[in-house]
Image (cartoon, rainbow, N blue to C red):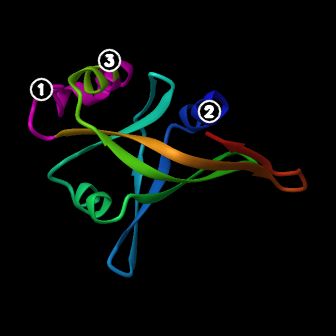
Amino acid sequence: MQEVFDFLKKCGTFYLATTEGDQPRVRPFGAIDIFEGKLYFQTGKVKNVSKQLAANPKIEISACDGPAWIRLQAAAVNDDRLEAKRHMLDANPMLKDMYKADDANTQVLYLKDAVATIQSFGGEPKVIKF
């Protein structure tokens, strides 16, 4: 999991895909965190992505770093604990202008049953499960 975190952190921006009915939805994200041995991301409860995750928690993430890329599939699990929200905001201080750990909007989710594939052209894929 640490290798997946490091890859995504180095990329800066990663793309998270959800579904809305039968329509895929993809948007850029940048905030990730490791807390209590789980990989987390953050959004706002008022956003469509939050509603999509409530209806179907299956996600995919993709990002590129030069000639290497990552594809990650998992289920997103909501964690409404204040400690998890605080940890995310402390690890990603750029979010603190928009979110507070104790507001009604901040949502943090961790990845469950994750399978990540890191690959580059001509290289063998590396599969990481967590």
| For residue 64, side relative to residue 38 (left or right) | right
Mark 3 crowdedness (10 Å alpha carbons): few <14, some 14-19, many ≥20:
some
Q: Earlier in the sequence, mark 2 or mark 3?
A: 2
Q: Amino acid at mark 1?
A: Asp
- Give the extent of the magenta segment: 88-105
Q: CA distance from mark 2 to mark 3?
A: 20 Å
Label 3 residue SS: helix
Up the image or down, 56 lies above or below 92; here it is below
Nearer the observer: mark 3 or 1; the answer is 1
Mark 2 crowdedness (10 Å alpha carbons): few <14, some 14-19, many ≥20:
some
Label 2 residue SS: loop
Tag 2 and tag 3, C-beta contact below 8 Å: no
- Location of mark 2 (residue): 1
Q: Which mark is residue 102?
A: 1
| For residue 36, side relative to residue 102 (left or right) | right
- For the point 81% across and 51% down, which residue is it? 125
For the C terminus, the image quarter is top right
